[in-house]
Image (cartoon, grey):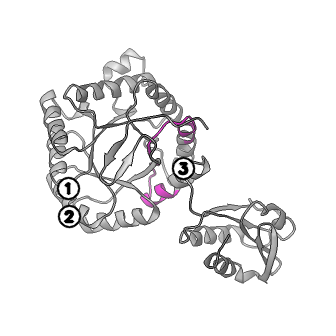
Amino acid sequence: MKERRKTREIQIGNVRIGGSQPIAIQSMTNTRTQDVEATVAQILRLEEAGCEIVRCTVPDLEAAEALAEIKKQIHIPLVADIHFDYRMAIAAMEHGADKIRINPGNIGSAENLKAVVDVAKERGIPIRVGVNSGSLEKELVAKYHGVTAEGLVESALDKVRRIEEQGYENLVISIKSSDVLMCVRAHELIAEKTDYPLHVGITEAGTVYSGNIKSAVGLGLILYQGIGDTIRVSLTGDPVEEIKSAKQILRTLGLRKGGIEVVSCPTCGRTSIDLIRLAGEVETLVTNYPLDIKVAVMGCVVNGPGEAREADLGICGGKGEGLIIRHGEVIERVPEEQLLNALKIQLDHWKE
């Protein structure tokens, strides 16, 4: 793991990103922002899962006005996602957005951009400059003979320059692509050219299955190089799944501690219990415990104790009997159907 890239620190509501701050986890609501009740309910679920910054789309004035009421009922920074209409960026800031996400290339004239920057400057609201491979300018596509990492970086830095010329540098940059390796290369390039904090993600990654694989590979390669200050795992599904995945990626890379890590064997012909179901139940159970430990779920009593030795707690079973294992030692034998409850008892009373 390379040393973390040093970036500027940016304040977003009650969260700071960049510098030596932990990598923050983000998500985006998929409710209609105008539906305050549904949007708040989803954000509260995201908060409970571990989301630290949340973004809502603001397509019209009704959505912008809804931000004020939404913000009263949540506890994490609220980011307004703006496309095309600069007036929505201004309205969102006036109604409490802690940050706005814009592409300066698609909100109109230089005067429109100046109007947005003036309000952001007056209120001290950071701007996330977002550039996606799907909206890369035709001139850059022609210059680089296609959509490329180099084109993405040039586009992003050009947008940043336009805002800097307005005398404002309270910025976060995101350069996203659905092409994983292009996205990785773009982040490598831009990290050499700027010290603004970077919002990292693989855009349009796909379903929970394919999106998780693409995001784990892409974010893993980027973060391993010390690049990235805040991340979003983009999935077509319940946004709570994005938070679970982001936390697991950060834990796997050693960039986040806390929370129970579940490991489980892949099953084989010796497995005589419903290990797939049991592992899923354990994974659900442990989300309620703020413990920094490893729990192993093994499928047979032959190799289970040995394979679970590196875990703090382990369970395994077969042929009607279940074992509770602690630091590699069997501490209890229970009927197989009582394994999950026995594990819960151990977690309830856990002490190192």
Which residue lies at the image location 23% right of the left edge and 30% below the top edge?
163
65 and 228: which one is in front?
228
Which residue lies at the image location 29% right of the left edge and 52% below the top edge?
13
Q: Residue furthest top?
A: 143
* N-terminal-most mark, 3 or 2: 2
* Dot 3 amino acid type: Asn
State the image coordinates of residue 298 (x, y, percent, origin top left): 76, 66
Q: Is mark 2 on a helix, strand or loop?
A: helix
In the drawing, what numbered circle is on residue 289? none
Magenta stretch: residue 31 in it? no
- Which region shows up in magenta? 220-244
Q: Report which residue position mark 3 lands on.
A: 212
Q: Which of marks 1 and 2 is in front?
A: 2
* N-terminal-most mark, 3 or 1: 1
Q: In which quarter of the image is residue 315?
A: bottom right
Q: In this view, does 312 lie above or below 343?
A: above
Q: Report which residue position mark 1 lands on.
A: 63
Which residue lies at the image location 67% right of the left edge and 72% below the top edge?
278
* Dot 2 amino acid type: Glu
The quadrant of the rendering that contains the N terminus is top right
Q: Residues within 10 Å of mark 1 (few under 14, many from 20)?
A: many
Instruction: Give how far apart the Cα atoms at labels 1 and 2 are.
Output: 10 Å
Q: Is residue 52 left or right of residue 310?
A: left
State the image coordinates of residue 260 (x, y, percent, origin top left): 60, 64
State the image coordinates of residue 46 (x, y, percent, origin top left): 41, 62
In the drawing, what numbered circle is on residue 69? 2
Q: Residues within 10 Å of mark 3 (few under 14, many from 20)?
A: many
Instruction: Give how far apart the Cα atoms at labels 3 and 2 are.
Output: 33 Å
